[in-house]
Image (cartoon, rainbow, N blue to C red):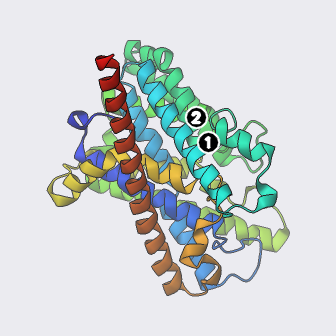
């Protein structure tokens, strides 16, 4: 997630930026209460359009897992990298959270002991679930990375198929909930995707050998995600059954969501990242994580949507307009804040080093 510039691949930097914008879209639609009520017989066009956008953006998180797994499987564990990443998360958690509380952006009733514990212990309290999972995966890197490097193709393939069968395929086909299903919000699912990404890097997938196949896999997966939702909804409205699994296809560890993410990942993996877009993506990529850490801070995660009139959206054109504006503006704000944070950290580090040298 934080490779040095000389090691970067512009094509995957493009995917990183696109996936982060998709993440913003997901949080705008979900936390902005724009998704239509699937348990209701009546759903307006804006609610339906929101589900379509959700289906084509739900791949974002799995794409990030594939990206980090793709690079981590060839990376050595470094405590300094772990410390810097944790410090980055902590600075956002405390800084943005305290600022939101001080300015009244967070209602005073919500600023309690639990709120402060979440700010000051972001990993242990699961402030940012994705970063908690990533950091734990990184801690396991000496074990997982070594295992991947020492497995041959057959061994790694069997491992990937086994974990996906247990943690992905099984929940995708059963008509009920599994008690141990965390819907992809934990390090277990991250480890599954890590193994898949490692296999793709080491041996490739014939399905991804052509970019048109990748496009078909992405589009087909997204369409199937949406189709399953409305098929289950039809059964629910008619019989009242399947209420607990209505939105199962929109969960990260569902086979359709994973397949669509692999398709989008493969499409960019075989790209060249040439031209102005690739160059811009390369320059912005080191700061993209700041977008997530900014807009998903507990102090602002349920409030920033109001700046884009989420509560006033009633039509499809309004939905599309404000969703695009939200994605672009929050992306730009997150990149700018992370650039400023990085600049200040480097400046302070340089000043401290110079002072230490003088002493």
Q: Residue at the front extreme?
A: 359
- At 72% from the left and 61% from the top, the residue drawn is 246
Instruction: Judge from the rendering whether residue 161 lies leftward or rightward of residue 13; answer left or right.
Output: right
- At 44% from the left and 54% from the top, the residue drawn is 20
- At 49% from the left and 73% from the top, the residue drawn is 323
SS class, disc 1: helix
Question: Can residue 135 be seen by looking at this rendering?
Answer: yes
- At 78% from the left and 56% from the top, the residue drawn is 110
Q: Residue at the left extreme?
A: 275
Q: Position of residue 95 (x, y in %)?
A: 56, 47
Q: Position of residue 37 (x, y in %)?
A: 72, 73
**Quarter that holds the C terminus:** top left
User: Which disc, if any, is residue 288?
Assistant: none
Q: Position of residue 45 (x, y in %)?
A: 60, 84
The alpha-carbon separation of the residues under discs 1 and 2 comes to: 6 Å
Q: Is residue 71 above or below residue 268?
A: above
- Asked whether the beta carbons under mark 1 and mark 2 sit within 8 Å of each other, the answer is yes
**Residue placed most toward the observer, 320 or 345:** 345
Q: Is residue 83 above or below residue 28?
A: above
Q: Quadrant of residue 162?
A: top right
SS class, disc 2: helix
Q: Position of residue 96 (x, y in %)?
A: 57, 51
Q: Residues within 10 Å of mark 1 (few under 14, many from 20)?
A: some
Q: Which residue is mark 2?
A: 133
């Amino acid at each position: 997630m934080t490779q040095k510039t000389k090691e970067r691949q512009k094509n995957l930097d493009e995917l990183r930026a696109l996936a982060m914008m998709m993440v913003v879209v997901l949080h705008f639609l979900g936390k902005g209460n724009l998704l239509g009520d699937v348990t209701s017989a009546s759903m307006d066009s804006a609610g339906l359009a929101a589900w379509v956008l959700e289906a084509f953006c739900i791949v974002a998180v799995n794409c990030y897992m594939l990206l980090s797994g793709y690079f981590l499987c060839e990376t050595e564990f470094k405590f300094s990298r772990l410390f810097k990443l944790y410090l980055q998360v902590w600075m956002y958690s405390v800084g943005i959270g305290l600022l939101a509380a001080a300015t009244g952006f967070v209602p005073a009733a919500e600023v309690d002991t639990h709120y402060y514990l979440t700010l000051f212990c972001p990993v242990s309290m699961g402030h940012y679930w994705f970063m908690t999972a990533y950091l734990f995966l990184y801690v396991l890197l000496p074990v997982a990375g070594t295992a991947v490097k020492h497995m041959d193709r057959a061994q790694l393939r069997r491992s990937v198929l086994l974990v996906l069968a247990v943690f992905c395929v099984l929940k995708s086909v059963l008509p009920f909930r599994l008690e141990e299903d965390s819907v992809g919000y934990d390090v277990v699912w991250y480890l599954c995707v890590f193994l898949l990404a490692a296999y793709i890097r080491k041996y490739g997938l014939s399905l991804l050998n052509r970019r048109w196949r990748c496009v078909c896999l992405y589009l087909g997966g997204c369409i199937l995600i949406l189709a399953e939702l409305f098929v289950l909804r039809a059964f629910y409205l008619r019989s009242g059954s399947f209420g607990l699994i209505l939105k199962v296809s929109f969960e990260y560890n569902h086979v359709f969501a994973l397949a669509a993410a692999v398709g989008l990942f493969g499409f960019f993996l075989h790209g060249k990242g040439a031209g102005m877009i690739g160059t811009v993506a390369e320059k912005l990529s080191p700061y993209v994580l700041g977008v997530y850490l900014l807009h998903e801070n507990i102090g602002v995660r349920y409030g920033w949507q109001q700046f884009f009139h989420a509560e006033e959206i009633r039509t499809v054109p309004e939905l599309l307009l404000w969703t695009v504006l939200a994605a672009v503006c929050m992306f730009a704000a997150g990149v700018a804040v992370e650039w400023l944070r990085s600049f200040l950290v480097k400046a302070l580090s340089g000043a401290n080093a110079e002072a230490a040298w003088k002493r």
